[in-house]
Image: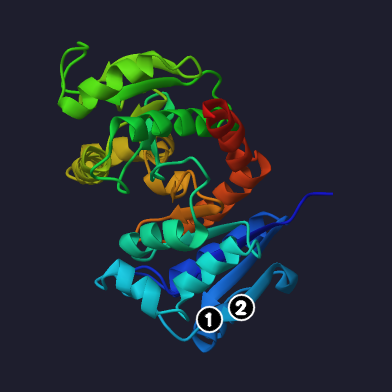
Amino acid sequence: MQEIVKVAVDAMGGDNAPGEIIKGAIDAINKMSNIKVFLIGKEEEIKTELKKYEYNKEQLEIMHTTEVIATEEPPVMAIRRKKDSSLVKAMNMVKNQEADALVSAGSSGAILVGGQVIVGRIKGIERPPLAPLIPTAKGVSLLVDCGANVDARASHLVQFAKMGSIYMENALGIKNPKVAIVNIGAEEEKGNMLVKETFPLLKECNDINFIGSIEARDIPSGYADVIVCEAFVGNVILKLYEGVGATLISKIKGGMMSTLRSKIGALLVKPALKETLKSFDASEYGGAPLLGLNGLVVKTHGSSKAKEVTNSIIQCVTFKNQKINEKIKANIIMKDE
């Protein structure tokens, strides 16, 4: 019998809440029978949305809260003051092991603060990074960190590399994943002070497959499976990646509709093109887990639609079943002690 994975979903977080968040949760339930979703937020609004759908009632429970943390609120103050917010309630459920994971499209700052203050770091983890999967020519790569630690130290990046390797090997089945550090050149002597300090430390790590530096232009080719950087660089890479991807898709669609001949050609290539473009859709891969916490916290885009929420919930199942946190504790913390 399959173990039930309990996922707390912040129904009020994000630009498209609660409608798209709830739709994503229902789609996840209808896809997988071993999920139980806790929809957390304003009960009446949630119930109104749920009337639109058919689903197994035993797989869903509403947890009523009265407050919502807005994106523009100061994160620390919001976490401290809004104890009855959907996000804080969800965080406490993970902390108290009432839920295995949390999915939220809400305030990034509040999620990062709540993750560390409420859920808490695994003992020995210095800084938890956000680690999204990004599409490449060979499948996907893990970008770590993309937004949690702007002023990271070399020791943080080493832990990012180790946690990223564990995640890719166990969650995605990539044996001995290739790890690279983002740099402005392939040579070891290049880079800023942080990269120069981190590079030799990564070379000395026997438990990761470090292949050296990676330039930004080589990321889409799938040159490395785990891409290590501090959050400022990672966030720029992620946002540029998303922007260029969206622009290219728009340009391709526009070009194919420009003339009668191109429209005829578009009909012929549409099935293959649709499948190709789908592989470069970031929402196909779920959200960004905050690695190194005592429980799983997954941040999705603020503009998330139902598909990304669904895939993020399913991502939680894989994380739980593959015992990622247990492996982080065993392979990083215990070895370092």
Give the residue number, with chain letter if any, for mark 1.
46
Residue 62 numbered tag? 2
- Distance from the alpha carbon under mark 2 to that under mark 1: 8 Å
Residue type for callout 1 = Ile
Residue 83 in picture, x, y percent from top left: 45, 79
Residue 45, can we see it?
yes
Q: Is residue 69 visible?
A: no
Who is closer to the viewer here, 118 or 173?
A: 118
| Relative vertical location of residue 311 with respect to residue 39 in this rendering, above or below | above
Percent x, y of residue 20: 45, 68
Q: Residue at x 56, y 36 (%)?
A: 328
- The outermost residue toward the front is 337
User: Is 231 displayed left or right of 172 in the figure?
Assistant: left
Q: Is the C-beta separation of discs 2 and 1 under 8 Å?
A: yes
Where is residue 8, by image quadrant? Answer: bottom right
Left/right of residue 46 with respect to residue 265 in the rendered view: right
Q: Viewer-proximal residue, 134 or 182?
A: 182
Picture residue at 54% right of the left edge, 34% below the top? 333
Nearer the observer, 155 or 185? 155
**Which numbered disc, 2 or 1, marks the residue that appears first in the sequence?**
1
